[in-house]
Image: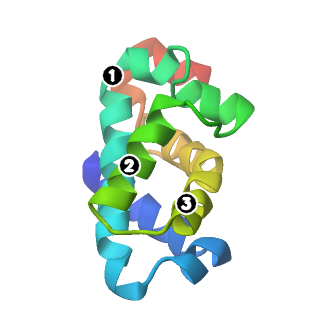
């Protein structure tokens, strides 16, 4: 599942002009991996998926300050990837669209990437 998420992250962020303008080319791979890892971790935890401030809230209300997924992602992008706040903002602004792609994309088992989460996949 991680490889499928990583591929979607690469495609989505690579096609976003705001992200492309703020992420140096030499840091793109580490950024893609960090974003994919945060999404993958969130999908592995149903509480993170549906709980207050979870992935579902990003889809309905957009990214906001205080959201634990946004906080973890921005901290990772700054500390691990050395990105600027501007680049972090551009990436987090693209998250709702990216998450829609991740959650609706068919996985290798044909049930979408959320197929393994049973009833949760019906929410998206």
Instruction: Determine contact: label 2, label 3, CB under 8 Å.
Output: no
N-terminal label among 3 and 1 = 1
N-terminal label among 2 and 1 = 1
Q: Residues within 10 Å of mark 2 (few under 14, many from 20)?
A: some
Residue at the image position 52 percent from the left and 60 percent from the top: 88
**SS assignment at label 3:** helix
Residue behind mark 2: 75
The answer to whether 9 appears left or right of 16 in the picture is left
Camera-near label (2 vs 1) is 2
Residue at the image position 48 percent from the left and 77 percent from the top: 23
The answer to whether 17 appears left or right of 43 in the picture is right
Q: Is residue 50 visible?
A: yes
Question: Measured from the top left, where is residue 10 in percent x and y?
Answer: 43, 68
Q: Nearer the viewer, residue 80 or 108?
A: 80
Residue behind mark 1: 45
Image quarter hosting the C terminus: top right
Residue behind mark 3: 91
The CA span between labels 2 and 3 is 12 Å
- Please tell me in which quadrant of the rendered image residue 35 appears: bottom left
């Amino acid at each position: 599942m991680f490889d499928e998420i990583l591929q979607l992250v690469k495609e989505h962020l690579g096609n976003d002009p705001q992200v492309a303008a703020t992420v140096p080319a030499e840091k793109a791979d580490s950024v893609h991996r960090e974003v994919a890892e945060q999404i993958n971790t969130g999908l592995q935890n149903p509480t993170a998926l549906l709980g207050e401030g979870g992935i579902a809230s990003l889809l309905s209300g957009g990214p906001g300050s205080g959201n634990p997924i946004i906080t973890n992602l921005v901290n990772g992008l700054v500390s691990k990837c050395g990105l600027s706040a501007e680049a972090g903002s551009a990436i987090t602004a693209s998250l709702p669209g990216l998450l829609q792609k991740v959650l609706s994309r068919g996985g290798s088992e044909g049930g979408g990437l959320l197929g393994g989460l049973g009833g949760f996949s019906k929410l998206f």
